[in-house]
Image (tube, rainbow, N blue to C red):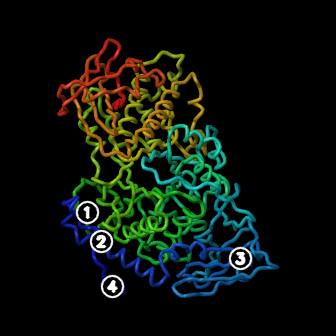
């Protein structure tokens, strides 16, 4: 047994930074001790973390240099294991595995005349003799490529070993200071009603992302999932890139081209649960209810109808950590957005539980410390072996120190999603009249984040685009989007209000809400309607499973205004780097005037949320400034009420606790809906 370890080396720094954590010192010590002992045992038993997490090169079916095939599986509940496939005429017993210690099995198939005995593209199955004597035909958990024929329900495992694999030509971009994320789904990335391809994304979508000023793409639904309508969150094959979009080499090329454009590529990784599929998934792989998962009630997620990993199991740690390593080293992903972290962190999985911010909610027996330890190990591995990579936690609970280094006792993530922000915008638009918007509440939501933990701000993500919910644009403009988005039609009050608020909400979220920004594909231009994948309930229609990028290219439609504003907003951030700057100083949140003003990265941002009042004379804190981005400009569908050639000079007039201020004032220069101004040095 490994010896007890000291507390996290820099825990005291964490406790001094947040004194409210002091009563939970022993919790941090216990969590770190679990992490430390796992790491020590890996060093002693597996030859180190580097070797342990390269297991994807030995488990599954792997080609040897001499042309032979080496196979290895973990099936602790199996009575016997065999390999069958096209290569042996599907004889279920001709190629038995040898039983090893700890539930492992191995098989070596020698080369045939210097060639592989299992040809590239041939189908395979692991045959498990279960404890009850039944023969189970399974896909290896480590399978690298699975496909489904149109006339079949289940996926088939295909041996992927092409004579020449794609070779990456471009280095990964350097670690970004300002992260502007374009959340994407390859399959819907086309105006056509079909499953789009990696090739389509490479040639048609990546240039669009680059032009819009995003420097990072976050890819959803890449890990293979049998059910397309699961949005990629019911994983069946963890090591396989989804074949419905193309081949593994197509994905590698897509990532390589993104790197050539300076775009960082993140994978939406799902290690919080797995599909219940057994024929083409992990469930009951060895014929038992457990194997990779907890058995019984604890191994099932009641809302998601999926299986839950046993993070205390040695081989589960090998599987998940090696999975991350494979995506980084084989495909060159630059990091991960970990989905469902809240479900992992707590035994209750967040079901029927609200989080008030009381620190007792984050410590105690209800915390799944095995899962937390896995996340610490994952981040430690990534930070040690690939320090340029980025990790993001999707956690709605607000677990303290989740984005602090493991050495402080934290979870080790780089960023966390600011999930309260989109909920706030929905609540405001859905429940409040414009004149009842509370400026203080908006500012509080956008700035209420844990000290020295980086947050990704977003006004909406894929969650709000799904059927049953509404995007901001659809909430703001609803049915009029079908009839009044043409510039040939009169600008109605609904469309005018929707376009202006859409721009303002995104800009204030971008500038005030965090240390990174995220947008779901298509939402930047107010994509109409909702997102719904083909399923029985909609007659397997692809009509809503697409992104109508063509709308921005029609000069007669107003979508072009929102698209242009989003582009220029990102380009302005690239120039001034407010996401990498300290948190903003808010100089004004005026309830009666509905004005918010703040300073960040040498810019002053001014927002007028008043539903009908523009101001001819309005004093704001500033020195000498000039307008850089104006949501009221004509190219963004605004009313052009500001003179962009005007320079604003301050005077020694104290205002909002600042010694200098300016008066935005002249006959043609009213204070419209929202704009940032730049201080002239």
**Real-space CA distance between mark 4 and mark 1, rounded to the nearest whole angstrom:** 25 Å
Q: Are marks 2 and 1 in contact (CB under 8 Å)?
A: yes
- Between 80 and 103, the residue placed more toward the observer is 103
| Residue density around tag 1, few if under 14, some if 14–19, many if 20 or more, within 10 Å | some
Compare marks 4 and 3 and give the one earlier in the sequence: 4
For the residues labelled 1 and 3, the Cα–Cα distance comes to: 49 Å
Query: Looking at the image, is 504 positioned above or below residue 169?
Result: above
The residues bearing labels 2 and 1 have C-alpha atoms spaced at a distance of 10 Å
Residue at which label 1 appears:
14
| Left/right of residue 191 with respect to residue 397 in the rendered view | right
Is the residue 41 above or below the residue 265 in the image?
below
Numbered mark located on residue 427 in the image: none
Task: Determine the image quadrant of residue 146.
Answer: bottom right
The answer for how far apart the CA atoms under marks 3 and 2 are is 43 Å
**What residue is shown with label 4?**
3
What is the number of callouts on the image? 4
Give the percent coordinates (x, y) of residue 536: 58, 48
Nearer-N-terminus badge (2/4)? 4
The residue that mark 2 highlights is 8
Q: Viewed as shown, does residue 298 lie left or right of 230? A: left
On the image, numbered disc 3 is attached to which residue?
65
Q: Secondary structure at mark 1?
A: helix
């Amino acid at each position: 047994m490994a010896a007890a370890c000291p507390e996290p080396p820099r825990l005291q720094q964490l406790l001094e930074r947040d004194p409210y954590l002091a009563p939970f010192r022993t919790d941090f010590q216990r969590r770190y001790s679990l992490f430390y002992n796992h790491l020590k045992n890996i060093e002693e038993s597996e030859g180190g973390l580097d070797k342990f997490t390269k297991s994807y090169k030995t488990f599954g079916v792997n080609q040897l240099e001499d042309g032979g095939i080496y196979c290895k599986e973990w099936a602790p509940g199996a009575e016997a294991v065999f390999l069958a496939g096209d290569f042996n005429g599907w004889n279920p017993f001709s190629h038995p595995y040898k039983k090893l210690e700890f539930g492992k099995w191995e098989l070596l198939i020698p080369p045939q005349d210097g060639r592989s005995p299992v040809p590239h593209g041939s189908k395979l199955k692991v045959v498990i003799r279960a404890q009850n004597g039944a023969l189970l035909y399974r896909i290896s958990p480590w399978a690298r490529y699975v496909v489904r024929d149109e006339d079949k329900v289940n996926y088939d495992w295909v041996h992927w070993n092409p004579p020449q694999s794609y070779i990456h030509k471009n280095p990964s971009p350097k670690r970004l200071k300002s992260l502007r994320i374009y959340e994407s789904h390859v399959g819907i990335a086309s105006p056509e009603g079909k499953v789009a391809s990696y090739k389509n994304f490479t040639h048609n979508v990546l240039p669009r992302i680059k032009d819009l000023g995003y420097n990072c793409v976050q890819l959803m639904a890449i890990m293979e999932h049998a059910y397309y309508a699961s949005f990629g969150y019911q994983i069946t094959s963890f090591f396989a890139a989804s074949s419905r979009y193309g081949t593994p080499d197509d994905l590698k090329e897509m990532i390589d081209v993104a790197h050539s454009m300076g775009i960082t590529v993140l994978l939406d990784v799902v290690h919080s649960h797995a599909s219940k599929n057994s024929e083409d998934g992990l469930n009951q792989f060895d014929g038992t209810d457990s194997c990779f998962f907890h058995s019984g009630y604890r191994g099932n997620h009641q809302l998601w109808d999926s299986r839950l990993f046993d993070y205390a199991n040695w081989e589960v740690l090998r599987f998940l950590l090696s999975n991350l390593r494979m995506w980084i080293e084989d495909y060159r992903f630059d990091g991960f957005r970990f989905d469902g972290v809240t479900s992992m962190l707590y035994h209750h999985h967040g079901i029927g539980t609200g989080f008030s911010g009381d620190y007792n909610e984050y410590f105690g027996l209800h915390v799944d410390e095995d899962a937390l330890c896995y996340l610490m190990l994952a981040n430690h591995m990534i930070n040690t072996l690939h320090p340029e990579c980025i990790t993001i936690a999707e956690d709605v609970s607000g677990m303290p120190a989740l984005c602090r280094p493991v050495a402080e006792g934290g979870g080790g993530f780089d960023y966390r999603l600011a999930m309260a922000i989109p909920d706030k915008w929905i609540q405001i638009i859905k429940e409040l009249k414009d004149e009842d918007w509370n400026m203080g509440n908006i500012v509080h939501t956008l700035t209420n984040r844990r000290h020295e933990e980086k947050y990704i701000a977003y006004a909406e993500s894929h969650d709000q685009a799904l059927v049953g919910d509404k995007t901001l644009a659809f909430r703001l403009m609803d049915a009029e989007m079908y009839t009044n988005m043409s510039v040939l039609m009169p600008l109605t009050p609904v469309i005018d209000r929707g376009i202006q608020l859409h721009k303002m909400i995104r800009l204030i979220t971008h500038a005030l809400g965090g240390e990174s920004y995220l947008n779901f594909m298509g939402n930047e231009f107010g994509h109409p309607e909702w997102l719904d994948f083909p399923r029985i309930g909609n007659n397997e229609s692809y009509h809503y499973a697409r992104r109508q990028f063509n709308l921005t290219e029609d000069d007669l439609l107003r979508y072009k205004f929102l698209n242009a504003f989003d582009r220029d907003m990102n380009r302005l951030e690239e120039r001034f780097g407010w996401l990498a700057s300290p948190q903003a100083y808010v100089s004004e949140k005026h309830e009666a005037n509905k004005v918010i003003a703040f300073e960040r990265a040498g810019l002053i941002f001014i927002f007028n949320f008043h539903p009908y009042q523009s101001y001819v004379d309005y004093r704001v804190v500033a020195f000498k400034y000039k307008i850089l981005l104006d949501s009221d400009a004509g190219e963004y569908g605004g009313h052009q009420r500001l003179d962009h050639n005007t320079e604003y000079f301050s005077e020694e007039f104290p205002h909002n606790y600042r010694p200098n201020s300016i008066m935005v004032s002249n006959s043609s220069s009213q204070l419209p809906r929202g704009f940032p101004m730049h201080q002239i040095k």
